[in-house]
Image: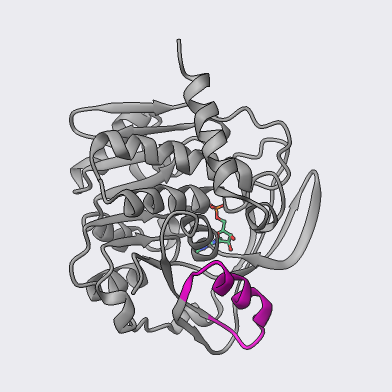
């Protein structure tokens, strides 16, 4: 049994930032979000990796208690190459190779079908929907996406958004998708599609959450040592839904706490390349940073 089903990429990333470079390192939206969620609950990933995917990466995920019954192995692994300049809020994509994700037919293992929580992490919206339809009675569905799918599968993306309870977008994607410079207008258009809450992530500047009745603004964490922001959006998403799955509480007040947990884990993730920082992370450190967040927004 898993608490949380996550569909998304499991990838080999080649990333360059002003502070270093990695080639074919462990990455992918489901990897980052699954790892982040595993601090809070039992996630199970749905994905496909190729024959070229190192076994040690799978072992790492198993050691964290992440369910991999939904991960198939065939063909070639999803690969992403990108870089960041000194403004690390925006990833520049050099290359995206979908590999075996291109013809992937996700079949949910029985152990996943009863899960109460679903994270539709970054991948083709058609796959997101196919997975969601196989989960019997989700309590809460959170959806994330990115510019690649906004450009390539816009209509399908809008369709899937109608099935999500919480939509996560970063600020530039929200402006691009809803063709407006105003984040308030973008959030309004997103809510009109069906989600009850829309969370707009603003990289190092924090996050905003909108519903039809309220809005909430979370601060950014003043991080001194940022080396690689790859996977911050995914770590945010994983910790966000992980906290909700753990507490079984999707009230507005608890969604606000989930945003702070998401921000805390994402800030740690940026401190090193690939999953290196999360591998050394403890729940104690997450709780300490959560308290710092409480401190910095008191006035
Ligand atoms: P982010 O949290 O936005 O920094 O996500 C970074 C991760 O997303 C990387 O590890 C990539 O492997 C993965 N990724 C990049 N492009 C895509 C895409 N088009 N679909 C799914 N995952 C992607």
**Image point (46%, 15%), residue name:** 298
Quarter of the figure with residue 200: top left
**Image point (80%, 45%), residue name:** 19
Let me know if residue 221 appears in the view.
yes
- How many callouts does the rendering have? 0
> Does residue 214 appear to the left or right of 217 in the view shown?
left
Magenta segment boundaries in residue numbering: 49-67
Which of the pair 130/103 is nearer the observer? 130
From this view, report whether residue 96 is shown above or below residue 134. Answer: above
Q: Quadrant of the C terminus?
A: top left
Q: Quadrant of the N terminus?
A: bottom left
Name the outermost residue toward the front: 284
From this view, report whether residue 3 is shown above or below residue 36. Answer: below
- Please provide percent x and percent y for residue 193: 20, 48
Magenta stretch: residue 272 in it?
no
Which of the pair 196/104 is nearer the observer? 196
- Please provide percent x and percent y for residue 291: 51, 29
- Please provide percent x and percent y for residue 178: 33, 42
> Does residue 4 appear to the left or right of 148 in the view shown?
left
Magenta stretch: residue 59 in it?
yes
- Please provide percent x and percent y for residue 143: 35, 55
Colour convention = one colour
Name the outermost residue toward the top: 299
**Image point (19%, 72%), residue name:** 136
From this view, report whether residue 81 is shown above or below residue 70. Answer: above
Which of the pair 251/172 is nearer the observer? 251
Ligand 1 located in image quadrant: bottom right
**Image point (65%, 67%), residue name:** 26
From this view, report whether residue 126 is shown above or below residue 40. Answer: below
């Amino acid at each position: 049994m898993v608490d949380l089903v996550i569909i998304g990429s499991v990838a080999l990333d080649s990333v360059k930032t002003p502070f270093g470079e990695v080639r074919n390192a462990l990455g992918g939206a489901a990897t980052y979000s699954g790892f982040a969620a595993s601090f809070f609950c039992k996630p199970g990933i749905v994905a496909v990796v190729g024959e070229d995917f190192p076994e040690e990466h799978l072992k790492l995920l198993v050691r964290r208690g992440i369910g991999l019954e939904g991960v198939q192995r065939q063909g070639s692994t999803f690969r992403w190459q990108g870089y960041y300049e000194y403004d690390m809020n925006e990833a520049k994509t050099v290359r995206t190779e979908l590999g075996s994700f291109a013809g992937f037919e996700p079949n949910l293992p029985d152990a996943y079908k009863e899960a109460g929580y679903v994270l539709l992490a970054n991948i083709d919206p058609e796959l997101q929907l196919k997975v969601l339809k196989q989960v019997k009675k989700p309590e809460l569905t959170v959806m994330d996406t990115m510019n690649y799918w906004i450009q390539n599968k816009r209509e399908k993306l809008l369709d899937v958004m109608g099935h999500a309870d919480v939509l996560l977008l970063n600020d530039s994607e929200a402006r691009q998708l809803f063709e407006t410079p105003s984040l308030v207008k973008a959030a309004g258009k997103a809510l009109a599609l069906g989600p009850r809450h829309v969370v707009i992530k603003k990289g190092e500047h924090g996050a905003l959450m909108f519903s039809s009745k309220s809005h909430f603004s979370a601060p950014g964490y003043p991080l001194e040592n940022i080396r690689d922001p790859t996977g911050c959006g995914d770590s945010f998403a994983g910790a966000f839904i992980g906290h909700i799955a753990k507490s079984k509480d999707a009230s507005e007040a608890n969604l606000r706490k989930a945003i702070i947990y998401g921000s805390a884990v994402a800030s740690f993730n940026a401190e090193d390349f690939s999953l290196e920082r999360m591998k050394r992370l403890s729940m104690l450190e997450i709780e300490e940073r959560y308290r710092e967040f409480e401190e910095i927004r008191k006035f």
